[in-house]
Image (cartoon, rainbow, N blue to C red):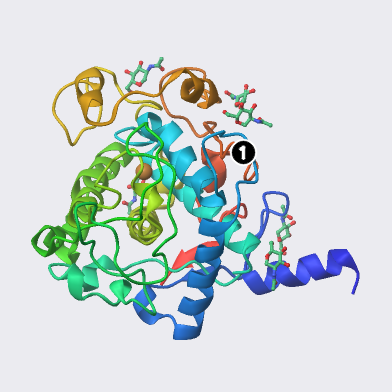
Amino acid sequence: MAKWIQLLVSAAILGTATAATGNCTSPEVRKSWHDIPNSQKTAYIKAQQCILSSPAKEGKIPWAKTRWDEFAGLHQLLALQIHSTGNFLPYHRYFLNIHKHLLNECGYNDSLPYWDETRDAGSFSKSPLFDKTYGFGGSGTGSQNCVPDGPYVNLPVNIGPGFKNQPRCINRKITDFLSTQCGASYVKSAVAPNNYNDAAKAIYMGPHLLGHEALAMMNGDSITSAGDPLFMMHHGFVDKMWFDWQKVNKSRLTEIGGLNAQDPARGFWEFSGTQESQSSMWGKPNAAQLALTPDPQLGDGGPNMTLNHSLSSLGIIPNATVADIMDTQGGYLCYVYA
Ligand SMILES: *[C@@H]1O[C@H](CO)[C@@H](O)[C@H](O)[C@H]1NC(C)=O
Ligand SMILES: *[C@@H]1O[C@H](CO)[C@@H](O)[C@H](O)[C@H]1NC(C)=O
Ligand SMILES: *[C@@H]1O[C@H](CO)[C@@H](O)[C@H](O)[C@H]1NC(C)=O
Ligand SMILES: *[C@@H]1O[C@H](CO)[C@@H](O)[C@H](O)[C@H]1NC(C)=O
Ligand SMILES: *[C@@H]1O[C@H](CO)[C@@H](O)[C@H](O)[C@H]1NC(C)=O
Ligand SMILES: CC(=O)N[C@H]1CO[C@H](CO)[C@@H](O)[C@@H]1O
Ligand SMILES: [Cu+2]
């Protein structure tokens, strides 16, 4: 089969499309981990183990030792641009797409699963997500809260805590009562506001934040929680909230707002104080980190988010714009949530 035909065929099977075609005829269907077959879980886990154990490839982030470090390291560099800003939902949607690319590199080409947390709200610890064979391993134990079992034991992450970079185990600590606010009624209020800024903030401060608190991934650290592969399941759930909000009105497919970097006077919305005072929790990026951090205003030409905002993965996948990722069926992206 000619190379271009293979590409067309695989694009059709996978429901993917590129910005060049602009078409999305058979979207990838993203399903909750609860609803995918064990064979798919096994394939996903195998690819994730491969990402965690493959050497760094891009070479842009010197302290990233593995492919996964390059991914978690990207989240660390961008942490003060993509949390408590208008770029929270867009960047994390793009981040899911970067993860999809890494899974592809490791041989997983099926759809991206996510975690419908409403099904486990209030009792996260009993969720099938924490299965040690067909899941992410359980709640952490010992002084470091290292995940004691499951597929990612003994696969260290070298990014974090905070802006430091030291090898550490994948760790988390589940607190069931905090997970209550990932339930259906909380999700419903998070997607109720009728403008982007209010909905984005309600999603961020609601089920997104409470999910992080209930899971305390990577010491619950806002800068590097992406080190735990479970982060991607949680952020699929967050992305679905935006997707559900966007579905209500076509005009929401072009609605964007907020700042493209944290307001230094406010920092993270979930903590009091300023960015400076909050930095006592995780330190500050050093000069080498600052030099690698993308310019938050690239594409916007000012402090406000626009559809022309540039999204970068530091080379893992090509840059995109917010306009590219607004519609999950716009062609650059091609998926729906079930
Ligand atoms: C999976 O996707 C990658 C990247 O698109 C591609 O190189 C690879 O051939 C695909 N593998 C299969 C089994 O389709
Ligand atoms: C959709 O959004 C447009 C523009 O904001 C608004 O005029 C219209 O009333 C909305 N429609 C619905 C059904 O909410
Ligand atoms: C991609 O984004 C990075 C970081 O913002 C920027 O430095 C680079 O110039 C962009 N690349 C292209 C091809 O636009
Ligand atoms: C969009 O962003 C690019 C850089 O990423 C810039 O060159 C261009 O001028 C921007 N367009 C508008 C309309 O702001
Ligand atoms: C940014 O947006 C705010 C709120 O919509 C607006 O008041 C301000 O003028 C904008 N700033 C720039 C530089 O566009
Ligand atoms: C940009 C692009 O390729 N658009 C095509 C999408 O598919 C429709 C129908 O198949 C074509 O008419 C468009 O040209
Ligand atoms: Cu994040």
Image coordinates of residue 102 in percent, x first then y, are 58, 56
Quarter in which the N terminus is drawn: bottom right
Position of 43 relative to 106 (above/below) = below
Q: Quadrant location of ligand 1?
A: bottom right
Q: Give how far across and how far down residue 246 sits, in percent.
A: 38, 53
Q: Position of residue 78 (x, y in %)?
A: 43, 33
Query: Please, which residue is most extreme toward the left here?
Result: 177
In screen coordinates, is 272 left or right of 10? left
- The answer to whether residue 239 is above or below residue 310 is below
**Residue name at image x 56 percent, y 68 percent:** 27
Foreground residue among 286 and 104: 286
- Image quarter (top left, top right, bottom left or bottom right) of the C terminus: bottom left
The residue that disc 1 covers is 319
At x 30% / y 26%, what residue is drawn? 283
Q: Is residue 326 visible?
A: no
Q: Secondary structure at mark 1?
A: loop
Residue furthest right in the image: 2
